[in-house]
């Protein structure tokens, strides 16, 4: 029996409330299972420290006391969900945005490097794809190196980029943006190359019979055909760019950014700080990908109208 919305009777899903329930119920169910499992895992991982503390105090303890203690430790191995939520609220809503304790401040630093790297990577990827399509020599000589470049672990190459650019006098956002660009140009290149090659050979022959120039074939046929592939690759690229920006903050000893927040949390054993930064990074990633999806809808809508 299918569960597709379109397959259901109209009366079952046409109202907004019913559609919300249809889509939200599975998400809420999965979230509830994750939260319950998280609480259980927190008890299991934090229990040894709590039992040692009870033993040093020389007192008896009950299961209820053990569970309460594992969910209220200052530096737990795995914080309980409500502890992470409290820390996230404090650092997002109860702290001034310009404070270095604010996750909004750190997210802003990371997002600025992410967007700069994304713009550079997208421009580089599109330029390489256009070159590969029009110059067969680039297809044979450059594409294998582009693929090989992605086999180098970013954790290995990031410190070298930071050191080289630092010696050249480039600091601030640029090293992080270059690392983001390195990660995000590849999906754009591959996606746009595939899109530019997607027109049917008969369509290309038809353009030639019209004596269309290469520029006209590109503008009228290849580029519109590649738009869908471009936005699909941009969604992957902007998520990769965010990862690159966070990784780029790790070897620099940066004082700001989500990567710096993760690093300081690991130094001082502040697991709640680490999880809050991870949640913020996830939310930032969702927002950035959603922005690309909105741009895709607008562009595709205009192309359809045209």
Image (spheres, grey):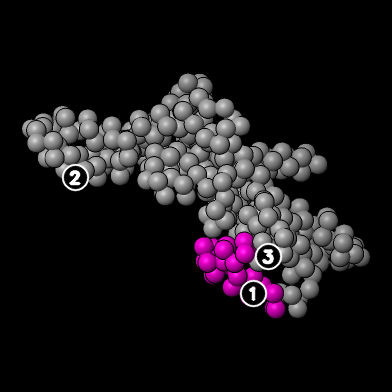
Specify whether residue 160 is painted magenta.
yes
Q: What element carries label 1?
A: helix
Q: Which of marks 3 and 2 is nearer the N terminus?
A: 2
Most foreground residue, 294 or 162: 162
Q: Earlier in the sequence, mark 3 or mark 1?
A: 1
- Residue found at x 48% / y 41%: 277
Left or right: residue 263 versus residue 237 is left
Name the residue beneath numbered marker 2.
48
Pinpoint residue 189: horizontal percent, then vertical percent.
Answer: 67, 62
Q: Can residue 298 be seen in this view?
A: yes
Q: Nearer the viewer, mark 3 or mark 1?
A: 3
- Residue found at x 87% / y 62%: 215
Q: How crowded is mark 2: few (under 14 residues within 10 Å), some or many (20 or more)?
A: few
Name the residue beneath numbered marker 3.
167
Are circles 1 and 2 on residues that touch, CB within 8 Å?
A: no
Left or right: residue 301 versus residue 275 is right
Most foreground residue, 228 or 291: 291
Q: What stretch is highlighted in magenta?
A: 140-163
Q: Nearer the viewer, mark 1 or mark 2?
A: 2
Q: Can residue 194 be seen in this view?
A: no
- Position of 25 relative to 265 (above/below): above
Are circles 3 and 1 on residues that touch, CB within 8 Å?
A: no
Pinpoint residue 223: horizontal percent, then vertical percent.
Answer: 77, 56
Query: Where is the N terminus found, in terms of image quarters?
Result: top left
Name the residue beneath numbered marker 1.
145
Main secondary-structure element of the magenta-colored stretch? helix
Residue 128 lies in what quarter of the image?
bottom right
Q: Distance between the residues labelled 3 and 1?
A: 26 Å
């Amino acid at each position: 029996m299918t569960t597709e919305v379109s397959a259901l009777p109209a009366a079952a899903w046409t109202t907004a409330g019913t559609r919300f329930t249809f889509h939200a119920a599975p998400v809420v169910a999965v979230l509830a299972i994750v939260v319950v499992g998280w609480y259980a895992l927190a008890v299991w991982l934090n229990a040894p420290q709590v039992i040692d503390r009870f033993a040093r105090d020389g007192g008896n303890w009950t299961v209820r006391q053990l569970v309460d203690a594992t969910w209220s430790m200052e530096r737990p191995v795995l914080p309980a969900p409500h502890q992470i939520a409290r820390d996230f609220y404090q650092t997002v809503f109860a702290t001034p945005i310009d404070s270095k304790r604010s996750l909004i401040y750190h997210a802003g630093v990371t997002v600025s490097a992410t967007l700069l790297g994304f713009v550079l990577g997208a421009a580089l990827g599109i330029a390489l794809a256009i070159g590969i399509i029009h110059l067969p020599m680039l297809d044979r000589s450059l594409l294998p190196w582009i693929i090989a470049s992605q086999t180098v672990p970013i954790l290995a190459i990031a410190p070298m980029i930071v050191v080289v650019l630092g010696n050249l006098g480039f600091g601030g956002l640029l090293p992080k943006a270059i690392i983001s660009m390195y990660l995000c140009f590849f999906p754009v290149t591959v996606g746009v190359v595939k899109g530019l090659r997607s027109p049917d050979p008969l369509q290309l022959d038809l353009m030639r019979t019209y004596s269309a120039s290469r520029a006209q074939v590109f503008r009228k046929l290849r580029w519109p055909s590649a738009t869908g592939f471009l936005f699909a690759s941009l969604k992957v690229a902007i998520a990769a760019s965010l990862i690159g920006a966070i990784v780029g903050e790790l070897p620099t000893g940066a004082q700001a950014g989500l990567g710096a927040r993760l690093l300081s949390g690991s130094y001082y054993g502040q697991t709640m700080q680490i999880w809050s930064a991870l949640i913020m990074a996830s939310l930032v990633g969702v927002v950035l990908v959603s922005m690309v999806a909105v741009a895709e809808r607008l562009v595709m809508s205009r192309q359809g109208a045209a």
